[in-house]
Amino acid sequence: MDMSHFAMRAWASALLAAGVFVASAFATSARAALDEVSLPSAGVLKIEASLRVAKGTYIRAPASDDPAAANCVMRAVGVHGATIDLRGVELRGSPVGTELEHAEGIGLHLVDCSDITVVGGTFAGFKGCIVAERCRGLRIENVRFDGYFAQRLLSTEAAEHPADDLAPRDNDKGEWVTNYGAALALDGCDGAVIVGCRARHGQNGLLLRGCTNARVYDNDFSFLSGWGIALYRSSDNVIARNRCDFCVRGYSDGRFARGQGAAGILLFERSCDNVIAANSATHGGNGLYLFAGRDLVDGKARERGEQAAGGSDRNLILGNDFSCAVVNGIECTFSGENRVIENVAEGCRQHGLSGGYSSRMTIIDNSFNGAGVAGIAIAHGQECMIARNLIERCELGLELSWNAASPFVDGAFGARRDTSSRDHRIIGNSFAENAADLALEHTSGLWFWENVFAASKAQLACTDVTLAPGESASGLAPQELVRGLAGIAPTGRMSAVTLRVADDSLPDEWRARMSVEAREWPGTTRPFDPARKDRPGLDAIVVGEWGPWDFESGEARPRARAVAGLLAAASWRARWFRWEPATDPRGDAATQQAWRALAQTPRIGAEIGVWSDPWGSREDVREALGVEHFGLLATTDLELPAGRYRLRVHSDDGVRVRVDGVRVIDNWSWHAEVVDEATLELAAGVHAFDVEYFQIDGAAALALDLLRR
């Protein structure tokens, strides 16, 4: 069996086969003279044919020309074969300095058009800068987006805030762009070409929903607080040579790292047969986040009568850099037959590759060095090929496992799909300087061949390791089958594992999975050097109130937002008490009054500065109260200038807040973590804030944040 490392630049051949152009720079083709127009001072510019917008800076509030359509500045409906030339134009939906969360409406809205080209221009201050629906043959080139919609982030350097978590699970009604905005949002567009565009100071770069045969290349969607490029029910697209670095939120170096759903590249809900190649998506929440979607995992397709729903399957992930991810360089889950070839995912805080519930995944010639948890981790996966990867300096090299307690085993996914861990082939990988090389648990039919392990005094701990049925190892102990070249054994552990006897042959079907036809791709390079040594580490990520710091532009490092906002200056007088079912705070008025009366003889009292949990971050309070059936009354006085304020309260369970005796937040129920908001119009002076809170059981949360609007 020829196991030599690829020397054929496989990433190039796949792009050619997918039909990406070979030129590295795409000059705008010569166009006939266009009619020049100026934007009207109010209302909507209706585009009916090719035009050039007169150069200049325009501030235009999105307006309506159709009660059934979104507000916009320019709109084309049913236009065919036209060019919209915006070179030299800056179009703003709101004045400079407007906070990004207040951006609204659409800059350019294209509906039911075909063969439209949009070239040049800069967009800012919109919820969706360019939004296209049901357009065929759309081309968008060399457009800039800078300073458009983004959510204000509530996490600080000291503590993350769960309200910042993104929720990509629902988008069948266009929730992504409605909730999170985008520089570019394409819905039901076939054959689109997006080239040479750049986005900064916003939440999302490019959103593709229900799009096929798109070509997205040579764009830069970096330093965003959400997703660089995101696909939903979008298949047969090529995403190549783009830069989606520092698409991140939910990170504070040395304190917390969850990513909160951000990713350089996102594939969601049955996005299949895409080519993701030669992109740089480093320093993201995840580098690449691929998930099957609710149709398969939650059984939504079956509820609709569809019996054979797939995941995000058969994608080619080739020659990308996903290094320094806050969570995983590559997260590829609940899907099948994806190929991960010649990628770099080094220095990721959790995994180089996380492949839970993946089947028949091919993982070849990648570098997963320096992972904080595991280089490769596959739980409940089947028939994966793991070959010729570098897995070095990781806390754990390779983890293969099965867990009976997983909710997916007996859930909607497990009812339709195999959730065992079995039949993986581990061939020719290099393991070195890992704290442990292997962690294999409840996994059957493993096949090891010609891996390289570093000599170590540490032992491989083995429990219940046997040969797979029908195998014979000529008297060798089963655990000897995992030894690598020169007979060197890995470090780590194996438990409840069966092994197969490897030889120098592979079935033709497995060989086909390992090969990609080689061709040259002349005149082009990746946007990164796979062997580069100057890549910054995770400490280069600095997340401010509006997203990651774009240090490349020379802008000032964002100031750390005070925990609790304006309430950081408050001093709360707090009283905690225990309560019994007879004084359940959800009862009638008399019972609630009896519950409040318990505060007159509190279990404990204290002065609290910032609320980051219902115990005031004090261990003595937690010890006195426990974690169930306790209550809290707290009050503070805060001097504020006249103005409009936003109060955000994060709670689990019940909470009420009064300001100057007026109830402004009322979520007096047993509930999971949720954020409630109130807008306050306050006169100058001292204002009284009062909080009532109860905890029943389970998780507990309480945090208050006051912002000037």
Image (tube, rainbow, N blue to C red):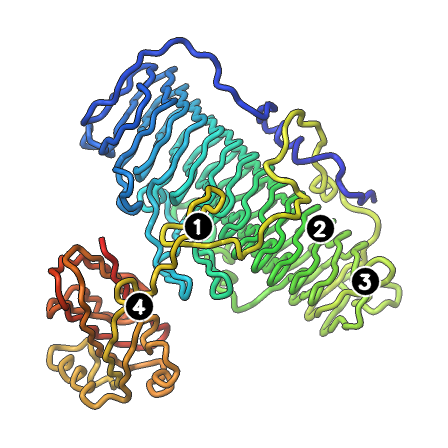
Whether 460 is drawn above or below 538: the answer is below
Task: Choose the circle earlier in sequence order: 4 or 3.
Answer: 3
Secondary structure, mark 3, is: loop
Question: Which labelled disc corresponds to residue 548?
Answer: 1
Secondary structure, mark 2, is: loop
Q: Are marks 4 and 3 in contact (CB under 8 Å)?
A: no
Whether 214 is drawn above or below 263: the answer is above
531 and 205: which one is in front? 531
Please provide percent x and percent y for residue 210: 42, 35
Crowding around mark 3 (Cα neighbors within 10 Å: few <14, some 14 to 19, many 20+) is some
For label 3, the residue is 483
For label 2, the residue is 389
Whether 322 is drawn above or below 403: the answer is above
Closer to us: mark 4 or mark 2? Answer: 4
Q: Amino acid at mark 3?
A: Arg
Crowding around mark 1 (Cα neighbors within 10 Å: few <14, some 14 to 19, many 20+) is many
Secondary structure, mark 4, is: strand
Gap between marks 4 and 1, in whole Å?
23 Å
For label 4, the residue is 703
Q: Amino acid at mark 4?
A: Ala
Q: Amino acid at mark 2?
A: Asn
Please provide percent x and percent y for residue 611: 31, 71
Q: Which residue corresponds to the image point at 65% horizontal and 35% vertical from the top-left?
A: 11
Gap between marks 2 and 3, in whole Å?
17 Å
Please provide percent x and percent y for residue 358: 58, 52
257 and 499: which one is in front? 257
Task: Choose the circle earlier in sequence order: 4 or 2.
Answer: 2
Closer to us: mark 2 or mark 1? Answer: 1
Task: Choose the circle earlier in sequence order: 2 or 1.
Answer: 2
Crowding around mark 2 (Cα neighbors within 10 Å: few <14, some 14 to 19, many 20+) is many
